[in-house]
Image: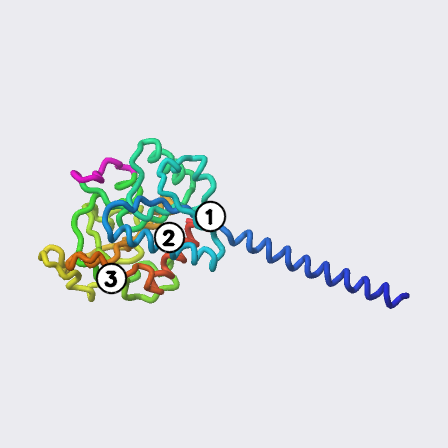
Amino acid sequence: MKLEVRSWKTAVLLLSICFGLFSTIQAQNQQARFKVVAFFTAKNDKAHISFVNEANRWFPKMAEKHHFTYDTSSNWTNLNAAFLANYQVVIFLDTRPEAPEQRAAFQQYMDKGGAWMGFHFAAFALTPSAYPQNWDWYHNAFIGAGSYKSNTWRPTSAILRVENRNHPATRHLPQTFRSAPNEWYRWTNDLTQNPNIRILLSIDPSSFPLGTGPKPHEIWHEGYYPVVWTNKQYRMLYVNMGHNDIDYANKTDKELSFTFDNETQNRLILDGLRWLASGKN
């Protein structure tokens, strides 16, 4: 009889230990989770559409592997306070909000400590164009780049140099690495003169000449070009990557490159995402 009681107590103890371990693991998983929502338009340039489609395949896989949730929306009316309150990080895969109330909601979200990651065309502004520079806070105060000035062509890989190795987004990167092919942007504002901007990556001079043309101004031979940066006043990360190479020349529209086919670059994006979700500046 005493043996049965002892066995029963042992079983209860083991169950308690297992339940405790399960609760601890469950709590750790809950703590590890964060929610991301990506807004996109994906209606204009085929290269941008290719990138958006690729991102919406890649991020869900990373979300499952690294314990976060990834939602998407092409309905920019969802850019409102009630909807954004459900997410720790907002991503703009391409374009930007246009309606005044959407812009106001996004600025309020960021002012209150929200986090944002923007890719490539999300920072584009050119007057006159379909995306004029008509949002001073976003392009000058927040991203800091001002307006689009020029770009390389065709999309080509570049050697990127890490400018700040102490930042959580870049601390696991080598000093230099080769990027995925991309169309690289140049801006009207000099980001080095903005005290709020921390440049994390730039194009290394060993990349020059960068671009293949055919127009001479589409090939860069010198200069300083930031490609990833953050703003000290906000939890944000702008990443200039996000333009896949498309076979326009032969009019096949075949996808010739993919942004997320680069493991080092992917590490930057994932570490940047974790930093944004951490709530730490």
Q: Earlier in the sequence, mark 2 or mark 3?
A: 2
Question: Dot 1: few (<14), some (14–19), or many (≥20) neighbours within 10 Å?
Answer: some
Name the residue tied to disc 2: 56
User: What residue is drawn where x is 20% and y is 63%?
Assistant: 205
Q: Is residue 47 left or right of residue 168?
A: left
CA–CA distance between discs 2 and 3?
A: 18 Å
Q: What residue type is labelled 1?
A: Lys
Disc 3 packing (10 Å; few <14; some 14–19; many ≥20) = few
- 49 is higher (above) or lower (below) than 106: below
Drawn side of residue 58 relative to residue 9, left or right: left
Q: What element carries label 3?
A: loop
Residue type at mark 3? Leu
> Could you tell me if residue 73 is visible in this image?
yes
Pinpoint residue 280: horizontal percent, then vertical percent. 44, 49
Instruction: Specify start and end residues of the magenta stretch as a single range.
Output: 127-137
**Label of residue 256 in the image:** 3
Q: Which residue lies furthest to the right in this view?
A: 1
Measured Cα–Cα span from mark 2 to mark 1:
15 Å
Query: Within the magenta stretch, is there residue 3?
Result: no
Q: Do the residues labelled 2 and 3 touch (CB within 8 Å)?
A: no
Residue 215 placement: quadrant: bottom left
The crowding category of the residue bearing disc 2, from other C-alpha atoms within 10 Å (few below 14, some 14 to 19, many at least 20), is some
Q: Quadrant of residue 271?
A: bottom left
Q: Magenta part mainly helix, strand or loop?
A: loop
Q: Name the residue under label 1.
A: 35
Q: Provide residue 258's location: percent of width, then percent of height.
A: 29, 60
Q: Where is residue 60 in the image (x, y as percent from the top left)?
A: 43, 54
